[in-house]
Amino acid sequence: MGAAGAIEVDGVSMHFATPSGSIQALDNVSLSVRPREFVALLGPSGCGKSTLLRLVSDVLTPTAGSIRVANTTPELARKSRAFGFVFQDPTLLAWRSAISNVLLPLEISGGSRDDAARARGLLELVGLKDFEASYPWQLSGGMRQRVSIARSLITEPQLLLMDEPFGALDEITRERMNAELLRIWQATRTTILFVTHSSPEAVFLSDRVVVLTARPGRVKLDLPIDLARPRDPAMKETVEFARYTAALRRALSTEETDLL
Amino acid sequence: MSTAAVALPGSAARRRGARARRVLVPVLGMLAVLGYWELHIRLFRVPEFLIPAPSRVVQAMFEEWPALQRNTGATLIESLGGFVLGNGIAILLAVLFVHNKPTERALYPIAVAIRTVPIIAIAPILVLLFGNGYTPKIIIAALISFFPTLVNMVRGLEAVEPSALELMRVLSASPAQVFWKLRVPSSLPFLFSALKIAATSCVIGAIVSEWIGADTGLGYLITIATFEFRTGLLYSAMVVGSLMALAQFGAVVLAERLIVRWKPPTTSTT
């Protein structure tokens, strides 16, 4: 371990203070992501997977435990732009054109001259070559999310944190975006930590799927996915694929009976 | 603004037809009302000192043009001065409120209190304090435009999506960057809807304050015309005042079109 691009989560717990008392979102979670690995965090809604992503990205600070991101603290990793973040909602700024949204992170960090060319290249990478001047309202949901992926890549991060990025998209667009994401991942050679509540999506994309239990979130299963790459959507009809999703479903459903 | 690139051939012509109809119908309605007014006055021989016919108003406008021009200039200075002053203070105060909650708690009730005092009641006080010149009128026009802008601007600056703030956090944006790149642009649509209110109400503020004590301005002209039963002049002063408000409103709408360009065209129509 220890190479750049990795995440080390060690014994992390997270409590939120609410008016009705303290809520424990995560309980003693440990997780490590190797460089260039694609890891999916899978769990029912409210299991703290988004919280974990926000701890890694230094939006929140853990109550207990330690986190290392790119061999440093989350705060320093954030300040050195070691990771990009893709939200469930594209969170594009409505008053900026697509290319201007992509350039936002560089504008904030004080970018250099060839930025526009690089932003154009990224828009091409996400398949929006002819839309650089479009405003968010002129783009479809899937296109907006592509812009937000391009934005997260503009700082050339070693690590990409994705919080259910395709959760709001329809099934067809989602499948297409999954394939595109794998292509982008291969092209940029980043490490990806991907939060989702869809087992097929997790299996299709990842090298490893980490299942979290709900309230408080604990690691329930850490399942390596040994499917060949590059992956093809037709793979979803294979027996191996079904076996993986079945294992995940079992892990998730025993979880539900625990709750009942 | 470039409209949808997928416009079908022929739809442009249809749209132009629809727009012409949208303009034509209200104009026809207006002409009908004016026509009826003119006819009624002539048929029933309504005395001019009660209600002048529209044709008389137009005639009076030409006859009294020098007086109208002079007094319109004064009211314009007052209303524009008040617009700039009132909105300027409101915007600065809104920025302060958003960044400093204790100030908001301390000053907001005062702002509301000022709002609740009738303008008619403040006007004499200000005339006593500042005399007959432009100052009290500008202050009143400012007071009348101040509150809607303050409320809307505070709302606009706070109308930032939590996820957008998270994005700024992840991007390690400084507070100044959050303000200029996020809060200010997202507040602009709110600001412009307030400025549209202020653009017309500051004219009212200026005219009303001229009633109390002034030797120039449309309000002054209205008082004189009323006392002397010069209804033609009275009505033309009213028309000019309304046109002034309309022009200021139009200027704000134009500025909004030029600045807030990221909205779909359908929602930017006012």
Image (cartoon, helix red, strand yellow):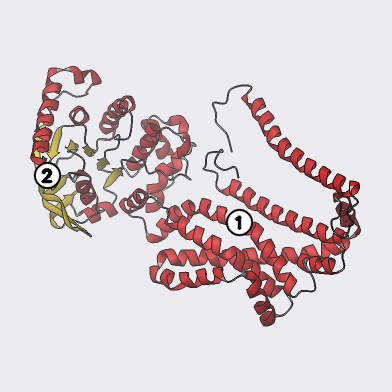
Whether pointer 1 and pointer 2 mark residues with C-beta atoms closer than 8 Å, the reply is no
Q: Which of the two residues, A6 or B267, is positioned nearer the viewer here?
A: B267
Q: Residues within 10 Å of mark 1 (few under 14, many from 20)?
A: some
Find disc 1 in the rendering and name its residue. B197
Q: Where does the image place residue B187, in percent across and percent down from the top left? A: 48, 54
What's the residue at 82%, 57% (across, down)? B236
Is residue A114 visible in this depiction of the protein?
A: no
Residue type at mark 2 is: Leu
Tell me the chain of label 2: A
Rendered view: B248 above or below B224:
above
Outermost residue toward the front?
Answer: B44
Q: Where does the image place residue B25, in percent across and percent down from the top left? A: 72, 36
Residue A143 falls left or right of residue A24: right
Q: Residues within 10 Å of mark 2 (few under 14, many from 20)?
A: some
Q: Quadrant of residue B39?
A: top right
Both labels 1 and 2 in a single chain: no
Residue B242 falls left or right of residue B255: right
Find disc 2 in the rendering and name its residue. A31
Rendered view: A162 above or below A204:
below
Is residue A208 visible in this depiction of the protein?
A: yes
Q: Which of the two residues, A28 or A191, is positioned nearer the viewer here?
A: A28
Outermost residue toward the bottom?
Answer: B129
Residue B94 falls left or right of residue B87: left
Q: Where does the image place residue B164, in percent across and percent down from the top left? A: 37, 49
What's the residue at 24%, 35% (across, down)? A189
What's the residue at 85%, 59% (across, down)? B50
- Nearer the observer: mark 1 or 2; the answer is 1
User: Gap in Å between the C-alphas at discs 1 and 2?
Assistant: 56 Å
SS class, disc 1: helix
Residue type at mark 1 is: Ile
Q: Where does the image place residue A24, in percent across and percent down from the top left? A: 15, 53
